[in-house]
Image: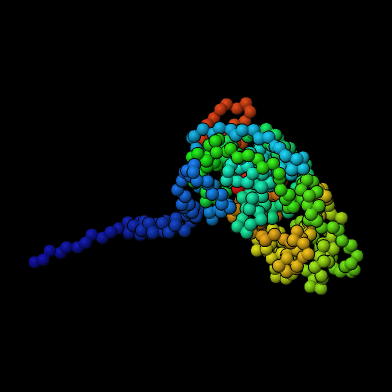
Amino acid sequence: MTPDITTPSVPRWIAVVLALLALVAVAVPIVLVRTAPRLPPAAKVVKAIPQRVVPKTELPPVEPAAFVDLAPQDARAFNATVPFSTDPNPAARPFRLTGSPDSQARAIDCLAAAAIYEAGDDANGAKAVVQVVINRVRHPAFPKTICGVVFQGAERRTGCQFTFTCDGAMLRAVVPAAWERARAVARMALNGTVDARVGHATHYHTDWVVPYWSSSLDKIVAVDTHLFFRWTGWWGTPPAFRGGYGGVEPVIPALARLSEAHRTAAEAAGAVTAQLDPSVLGDATIPAGLEQDTNTFLVTLDPKLAPEQFPTLAQRACGERPYCKFMAWNAKASTPAALPISPVQQRAMSFSYLRDRAFGFEKSLWNCTEFKRPVQNECMKAQVSMTMAPPPTAGAPYDPVPGGALRAIAGAPPAGTTTKSAGPEPLTGVRRKGDPATPATSATPAPVPVPLPRSDAAKEP
């Protein structure tokens, strides 16, 4: 006879508890996955260029600036991984400017332009920038004049050494007082003042970009948001900087708006456009300035107007404004609706007019691929995009001061903002007068660009 075996029954409350626990075990992970914060995108990996020491018998090549395609935050992260050199960093010899008074005046203004457009109205950064220019004059790899170094490559389609000379930054307004301060810094550097911090640096860049050459040179110091480099090996040592000064500075028509010395020579060559009679337009419609910048006009040209009438239209639009920019295109589709304009739109520009009465400057230029002109100095230069990163988006704030476009690229606030992020943080790795000596390897660049104008540049050799 088979015994009666029965399974003991589970109490109802235990079954309910087990079901609830199973439900929680499934639901909680689902909730955690759905509500977890999103991770930031992984930073791009930059493949560093192997460091190569150029032998003394081979002159180092000097290439136009080319930048790795990185977002500003990724660039800063990579730059922080590049160590500072622990080798000695001796100061450069004092420089003494020679040549005729006119040539010396042109040298001072070329160096001042590098100071204000690269570092802004900031004497601390400007001193470092002008020292790099002087170092380049003495190095065999570079031109032998101040203006030649600053504007090296600005006339070539392959690009420039200092970004501001070929990215349109020189069309931006400069406060006359800031210009005079930049000239004072330049004058001091050309008459014996040395910025010992940067030693024999020949290259620099802002910390929110990564040039391809940055990992192949010695990183020696940080000044504000700029990192300074010298060549490795013999070419970065004091004996390599043996070149003599040329003594005759070239005329730079692009500086005529700011510089009396360059303007006088440019006028002698017929490079400054004379004023035209506004009455020749009759009752033609006069364009209105932009809401975001009433001193700027973005205009589609009337096909009935002759090219000779463009300056007259610009003068009537500008009226009595002491500073005015008039930019015009032949096609409505090519005309920007707001600032800043993109490099593509800049290259498609048909006519431009710039007035700056603070510096006694007035200039008209035509796109000579569309309109033939009797003299070459009335033609726009071929525009080459040398910005350090893609241009700002359409919604980016417009900053109508030198370097504003680069500030927008870097995500910095417009110049004049009073928030903490508008100015540089104190530099822990840069010695000031009276500070105790500290090794250069402790320098930590501030994460915020220098406010403009004070400049940059994002610019960069």
Residue at 61 percent across and 33 percent down: it is: 93
Is residue 3 depicted above or below 272 in this figure? below
**Depth check, front residue: 188 or 37:** 188
Residue 125 percent location from the top left of the image: 65, 40
**From this viewpoint, is residue 71 visible?**
no
Residue at 78 percent across and 69 percent down: it is: 301
Residue 174 percent location from the top left of the image: 75, 47
Please state, as top left, top right, bottom left or bottom right, where the N terminus lies in the image: bottom left
Considering every residue shown, the one lying at the far bottom of the view is 304
Q: How is the image coloured?
A: rainbow
**From this viewpoint, is residue 340 visible?**
yes
Total labels drawn:
0
Residue 299 percent location from the top left of the image: 77, 65
Is residue 324 depicted above or below 198 in this figure? below
Residue at 49 percent across and 35 percent down: it is: 86
Q: Quadrant of residue 14?
A: bottom left
Q: Quadrant of residue 427?
A: top right
**Depth check, front residue: 289 or 239:** 239
Residue at 74 percent across and 52 percent down: it is: 253
User: Horizontally, is 249 left or right of 2 in the view?
Assistant: right
**Depth check, front residue: 11 or 60:** 60
Residue 188 percent location from the top left of the image: 70, 35
